[in-house]
Structures are given as C-alpha cells and as structure tokens.
Image: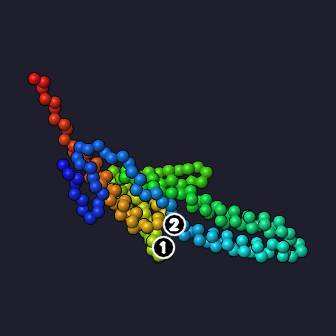
Amino acid sequence: MTQPMTYGGRPMTPPPGAPAPPEALIARFRGSARRLFWSALLLVAVAAATGYFHGNLPAPFEDWMLLAAAAAVVLLLVVVPFVVWSSRGYTVTTRRVIARWGVFARHSREMPHARGYQISMRRGPLQRLWGCGTLTLDNGVEAPLRLVDVPSAVLVHEALVDQVEVSQIMAHRDSQAIPPPPPLPAS
C-alpha cells in the first residue's frame, strides 16, 4: 500500500495497522516580546541618565545614591518583566499542546489533540499589527487553556487544527481496527 493521499498540505498519516509514529516537536515558542518594548526603552533611558548625572549631582547627593537608584529601577522594571516573560512558554507536538509557566514554582498544563478541542483566536488591533493573537483551547471538560500573545497566531491556529484533525482520524481508525485473522491450523 502506498502513502495515503492528503488534501491541501495536510499532514501525512501512516497506513492502517502501522505503529503510531513517535511524538515529534512541531513548535516551541513564547509570547510576543513586544511587551518588553517599554522595559528596553527604560533601560536605555536609565543608562543615559546615569551616565549624564554621574559626577554632576547637586551637593546633598552622592554618586553611590545615583547608582543604587539606577540599579533598583533596572531590577524592578527591566529584569523582573524579562524573567516573567521568559518563564512562560508553549510547546506543540504531534500529540499534545503543553503550556508551562512560573518563575519560582513551575506549572504545566497539557491538552492532547486526540481528545479534540475548540480553538478560538482573539486578536486586538495591536496584536494584528504585530501578527500576534491569543488562542483559547477548550475541550468542554476542563478549564480552557489560553495561549497568550502567540506570535504568528494564524499559523499556529492552522497547525493546531491540522493536528486535531489527524489525531482524531487516527484515534477513530484505531478504534475501528479489524482484529488480525486467527492463525492457520498446523497440518
């Protein structure tokens, strides 16, 4: 038997009776980095202000005060947002979607494709401008899984739809599998 035919670039499925292929990584991504724009701009402004005022402060202030204030601003308004942004990630495989988040305590949530779920996409004006969006995966049983500020949201949406379709076809085909014929009697 040859490979099954596919329509419009859909993923290929193995022939009936073939063992399931191993889980493969499709995409790994984080939310859009556009939310770090203000932090980056603040970092440049703090570096410029610190360089300008270092050694030129009025009498009651000293240089160490300026450096401590600059370090506190950078720590709170640049480093903390970056750490929070980098601690949230999403993984899409051929079998499931995994969302991981948390800075000190890591949390993880999975949603298998074979179970099926509804995918909705919300894109605001700025998200459309940057090609981002928020995807919500809802299987009707558990709480919806939200993938926030996904870059290339339309592409990720299409990939998820394809994976759900293939996984449900495979699950249905495997549930309808014909049992192997009994062995022939020895003669």
Residue 20 in the figure: left or right of residue 56: left
Q: What residue does disc 2 label?
A: 32
State the colouring used for the structure image.
rainbow
Q: Is residue 12 above or below residue 71?
A: above
Res 73 quadrant in image: bottom right
Q: Where is residue 136 drawn, in percent x and y?
A: 42, 61
Q: Secondary structure at mark 1?
A: helix
| Disc on res. 50 | none
Residue 42 in the figure: left or right of residue 155: right
Q: Where is residue 116 drawn, in percent x and y?
A: 34, 54
Q: Residues within 10 Å of mark 1 (few under 14, many from 20)?
A: some
Which amino acid type corresponds to the residue marked 2 in the rendered image? Ser
| Disc on res. 130 | 1
Question: Residue at coordinates 33% horizontally, 51% vertically from top-left?
Answer: 114
Task: First in sequence, mark 2 or 1: give its number.
Answer: 2
Residue 144 in view (yes/no): no
Which amino acid type corresponds to the residue marked 1 in the rendered image? Trp
Q: Is residue 35 above or below residue 138?
A: below
Q: CA distance from mark 2 to mark 1?
A: 9 Å
Q: Farthest residue to the right: give it.
A: 59
Q: Where is residue 19 drawn, in percent x and y?
A: 29, 43
Question: Residue at coordinates 61% horizontally, 51% vertically from top-left?
Answer: 104
Res 48 quadrant in image: bottom right
Q: Where is residue 70 drawn, in percent x and y?
A: 75, 67
Task: Determine contact: label 2, label 1, CB under 8 Å.
Answer: yes
